[in-house]
Image (spheres, rainbow, N blue to C red):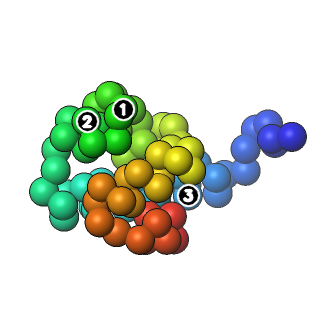
Amino acid sequence: MPLDPLPDWVPARRREIGVRIRAARRNAGLTQEQLAEHVGRDRKTIVRWENGYSVADLDDLLLLAYVLGVPLADLVR
């Protein structure tokens, strides 16, 4: 059962993961729109992930890592 409200460190970690997704996307030379097309999501979803407003599930993280050419651990470390 999830905690409500979440501990402060959870949103902070979500933002850190978003920063890593953004950096990997930029290093791959992709726009948010291009990344969205590759992983089957819309650009707004990429924006939400990169800004830490929402969390990519494991399947999406695996797709992101594959498309961006980085180990999954680099995104969630």
Q: Residue flagged by tag 1: what amino acid is it?
A: Arg
Q: Which residue is mark 3?
A: 13
The count of marks equals 3
Distance Cα–Cα, label 1 vs label 3:
22 Å
Distance Cα–Cα, label 2 vs label 1:
6 Å
Q: Are marks 1 and 3 in contact (CB under 8 Å)?
A: no
Q: Secondary structure at mark 1?
A: loop
x, y percentage for residue 77?
Answer: 51, 71
Q: Which residue is mark 1?
A: 41
- Residue located 27% across and 42% down the image: 38
Q: Nearer the viewer, residue 25 or 67?
A: 67
x, y percentage for residue 10?
Answer: 64, 52
6 horizontally vs 24: left or right: right
56 horizontally vs 46: left or right: right
x, y percentage for residue 39?
Answer: 34, 41
Q: Which residue is mark 2?
A: 37
Of labels 2 and 3, earlier in sequence is: 3
32 horizontally vs 55: left or right: left
Q: Which residue is farthest left?
A: 29
Q: In what quadrant of the picture does the N terminus appear? A: top right
Distance Cα–Cα, label 2 vs label 3:
25 Å
- Residue located 20% across and 35% down the image: 33
Mark 2 nearby-residue class (10 Å; few <14, some 14–19, many ≥20): few
Q: Residue flagged by tag 3: what amino acid is it?
A: Arg
Q: Nearer the viewer, residue 69 or 13?
A: 69
Q: Secondary structure at mark 2?
A: helix
- Residue located 29% across and 66% down the image: 69
